């Protein structure tokens, strides 16, 4: 590791072990998906989602700094479409298109619209704000999804899950500069 003294930028060499492990994890994940791996631990998928979402925030902030946020969203969307098409093609899942019901199509289309709006606003927020402010607010999606799951899908929510959601909301609030300023005046 070296530090560029003029700009204070830390430069590191690629960690080959980390790169190898990440590649191995991705291959394992893809292999279980392609083969229809029953008994796959969904928490692994969720953890990898969180890892890549974290990487997304940093990479998106870098990418959006040079172009309008809507253009950055378009580029990201095209990459996602190509990536997903490759996975569906490689796994031979295109034949399932005909089995999607009208309700399923409606839900998927509305999900796509919601995703597009989320990405547009996310990139606009990253364009004008710090990752340390944007990312925590974006993670309120957990709380929103949980509430919607309870009311729309009639999923049960355990008391400890509610406590966790409350901690997430509290954590997000603590990252906001205005809340920090008020707390600092009150506490100190």
Image (cartoon, rainbow, N blue to C red):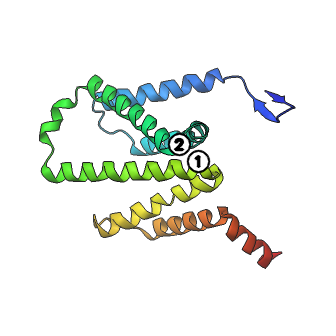
Left or right of 119? Residue 172 is right
Gap between marks 1 and 2, in whole Å?
8 Å
- Image point (46%, 58%), residue name: 141
Left or right of 135? Residue 93 is left
Q: Quadrant of the C terminus?
A: bottom right
Rendered image: mark on residue 184: none
Q: Quadrant of the N terminus?
A: top right
Horizontal and vertical percent position of residue 27:
43, 25
- Image point (58%, 54%), residue name: 134
Q: Is residue 161 above or below residue 138?
A: below
Asked whether the beta carbons under mark 1 and mark 2 sit within 8 Å of each other, the answer is: yes
Q: Is residue 141 above or below residue 36?
A: below
Horizontal and vertical percent position of residue 182:
73, 74
Farthest residue to the right: give it.
Answer: 5
The residue identified by callout 2 is 68
Horizontal and vertical percent position of residue 5:
87, 31
Rendered image: mark on residue 127: 1
Q: Nearer the viewer, residue 173 or 8?
A: 8
- Image point (36%, 53%), residue name: 114
Horizontal and vertical percent position of residue 45:
42, 41
Q: Nearer the viewer, mark 1 or mark 2?
A: 2
Sooner in the amino-acid sequence: mark 1 or mark 2: 2
């Amino acid at each position: 590791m070296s530090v560029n003294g003029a700009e204070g930028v830390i430069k590191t060499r690629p960690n080959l072990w980390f790169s190898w492990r990440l590649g191995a994890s991705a291959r394992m994940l893809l292999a279980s998906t392609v083969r229809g791996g029953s008994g796959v631990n969904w928490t692994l998928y969720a953890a990898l989602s969180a890892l890549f979402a974290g990487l997304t925030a940093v990479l998106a902030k870098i990418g959006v700094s040079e172009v309008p946020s809507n253009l950055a969203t378009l580029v990201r969307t095209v990459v996602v479409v190509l990536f997903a098409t490759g996975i569906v093609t490689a796994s031979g899942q295109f034949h399932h298109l005909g089995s999607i019901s009208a309700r399923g199509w409606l839900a998927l289309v509305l999900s796509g619209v919601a995703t597009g709006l989320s990405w547009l606003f996310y990139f606009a927020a990253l364009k004008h704000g710090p990752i340390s402010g944007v990312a925590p607010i974006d993670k309120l999606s957990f709380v929103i999804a949980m509430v919607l799951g309870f009311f729309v899908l009639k999923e049960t929510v355990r008391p400890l899950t509610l406590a966790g959601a409350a901690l997430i909301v509290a954590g997000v609030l603590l990252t906001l500069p205005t809340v920090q300023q008020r707390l600092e005046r009150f506490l100190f």
